[in-house]
Amino acid sequence: MTSRKAWPPATRRIARIAGPRERGSASLEAAIVVPAFLLFLGLIIYGGRTATTHQSLASAAADAARSASIARNQTAARSDAQQAATASIAAQDIRCTNITVHVDATDLAKAPGQPGAVKVRVSCRLDLADLSIPGIPGSQVLTATMTSPIDTWRQRA
């Protein structure tokens, strides 16, 4: 291995000039870049988790609206929508708590031959406490709404 003294004089001069000034610059760069990178990574995870959960809620709301539109009366529609939304959310394995399902099935009271629709709104609280990103709350309420038409000529109770 070559020692520093074996280098030519010009190289020793360059090493002497550049060496002391560059000390600690890698640790300074790491101290600035690493937190910024971790924040950026956390924001990507936050965005992905929020988008995935919202998509899952939209799917659950669509399932619930379809189930409610097939029912013959408002009571059955609310019950079927609640079951469908809960089953859909459970099957998608998302981190939701406080799941609420609001069903507007008033059009089921209309006489056959009149158009109508069932509207379902599904909400849940998404747990984000494990991210620990400044400015991001520990949980967030997400909501999805879907509408499904009622068969115009179907008999209703």
Image (cartoon, rainbow, N blue to C red):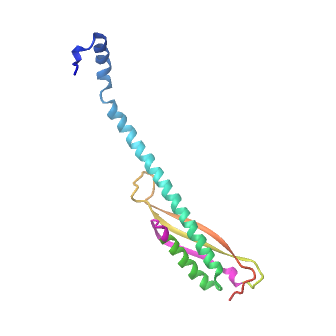
Q: Is residue 129 above or below residue 75?
A: above
Q: Specify the quadrant that holds the N terminus.
A: top left
Q: Nearer the viewer, residue 55 or 7?
A: 7
- Residue 59 falls in which quadrant of the image? bottom right
Horizontal side of 85 relative to 24 (left or right) equals: right
Residue 28: x percent and y percent? Answer: 34, 34
Q: Is residue 131 above or below residue 29?
A: below
Residue 156: x percent and y percent? Answer: 70, 87
Farthest residue to the bottom: give it.
157
Residue shown at 75% from the left, 77% from the top:
115
Residue 97: x percent and y percent? Answer: 45, 69
Farthest residue to the top: give it.
9
Residue shown at 23% from the left, 19% from the top:
2
Is 105 in the magenta?
A: yes
Residue shown at 65% from the left, 85% from the top:
72
- Residue 118 falls in which quadrant of the image? bottom right
- Residue 29 falls in which quadrant of the image? top left
Residue 21: x percent and y percent? Answer: 32, 23
Q: Specify the quadrant that holds the C terminus.
A: bottom right
Residue shown at 65% from the left, 80% from the top:
70
Horizontal side of 56 relative to 133 (left or right) equals: right
Q: Nearer the viewer, residue 116 or 66?
A: 66
The span shown in magenta is 91-109
Q: Is residue 25 above or below residue 72?
A: above
Is 62 in the magenta?
A: no
